[in-house]
């Protein structure tokens, strides 16, 4: 495994495959949020063979997001290969399809400052200290849904004696979901 020395605060690994409709917005939001926190960072987008314009959109954003790097990865090995080349002291795994609020990232970084080694935010973010979690990377091999990946990573991290913090999303009651469905206004067609 190639181990690089940390030279920035945070590496965000953004997993996107056939997500051309989301990738641009997500990359701009992540970069803007990390700049607002005053962190030095890099954003890695591993290309696992996307069949649409996901990679092209990410490459087009490179001039405006100088911390962005699009890298070639073997299919189903994108997270792991990106983590191996990460330069940040902290690594954030982010799946474009989770639509996670970036305020949760600040919460996770605070838990790391308080001493946790791994912070999992219910399938939205998986944040960990890179140097302490090297041995748990073998769970990042296969492309899986975020909750399964998080579960496997946490299981491996705990077996290695790492301190893990897990937060779960609050479940909405069926009545809350129905109320929101009927109180939102539908767009008017002309």
Image (cartoon, grey):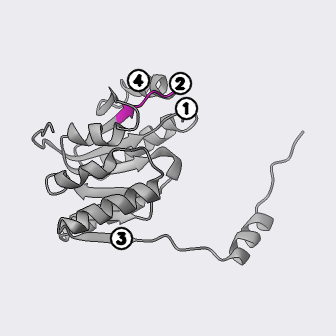
Q: Is residue 60 above or below residue 112?
A: above
Q: Which residue is mark 1?
A: 20
Residue 59 tag number: 4
> Pointer 3: residues within 10 angstroms few (<14), some, or many (20+)?
some
Whichever of labels 3 and 1 marks the residue nearer the N terminus, that label is 1
Is residue 63 something one can see in this rendering?
Answer: yes
Residue 56 screen position, x and y as percent: 47, 22
Mark 2 — residue? 53
Residues marked 3 and 1 touching at CB (< 8 Å): no
Local secondary structure at mark 3: strand
Q: Which of the 4 image quadrants contains residue 19? A: top right
| Label 2 crowd bin: few (<14), some (14–19), many (20+), radius 10 Å | some
Classify mark 4: helix, strand or loop.
helix
Extent of the magenta region = 45-52
Taking the image as shown, residue 39 lies to the left or right of residue 189, namely left
Mark-to-mark CA distance, 1 and 2: 5 Å
Instruction: List the residue tagged with mark 3.
Output: 166
Vertical order, 43 against 57 (above or below) = below
Secondary structure under badge 1?
loop
Q: Quadrant of residue 158?
A: bottom left
Q: Residue furthest right?
A: 190
Mark sitting earlier along the chain (4/1): 1
Distance of mark 4 from mark 1, alpha carbons?
12 Å
Q: Main structural element of the magenta stretch: helix, strand or loop?
A: loop
- Residue 83 drawn at (x, y percent): 25, 43
Dot 4 or dot 3, earlier in sequence: 4
In front of the other: label 4 or label 3?
Answer: 3
* Real-space Cα separation, disc 3 to disc 1, in angstroms: 30 Å
Above or below — where is 33 with respect to 172? Answer: above
Residue under the point 52% across and 47% down: 97
| SS assignment at label 2 | loop
Q: Earlier in the sequence, mark 1 or mark 2?
A: 1
């Amino acid at each position: 495994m190639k181990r690089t020395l940390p030279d920035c605060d945070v590496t965000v690994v953004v997993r996107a495959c056939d997500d051309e409709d989301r990738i641009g917005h997500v990359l701009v939001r992540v970069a803007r949020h990390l700049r607002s926190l005053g962190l030095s960072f890099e954003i890695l987008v591993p290309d696992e063979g996307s069949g649409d314009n996901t990679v092209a959109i990410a490459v087009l954003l490179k001039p405006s997001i100088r911390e962005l790097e699009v890298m070639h990865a073997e299919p189903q090995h994108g997270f792991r290969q990106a983590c191996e080349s990460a330069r940040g002291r902290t690594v954030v795994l982010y799946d474009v399809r989770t639509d996670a609020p970036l305020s949760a990232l600040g919460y996770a970084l605070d838990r790391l400052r308080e001493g946790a080694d791994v912070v999992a935010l219910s399938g939205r973010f998986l944040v960990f200290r890179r140097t302490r979690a090297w041995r748990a990377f073998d769970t990042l091999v296969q492309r899986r849904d975020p909750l399964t990946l998080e579960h496997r990573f946490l299981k491996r991290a705990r077996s290695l004696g790492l301190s893990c913090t897990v937060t779960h999303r609050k479940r909405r009651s069926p009545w809350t979901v129905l109320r929101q469905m009927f109180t939102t206004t539908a767009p008017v067609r002309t």
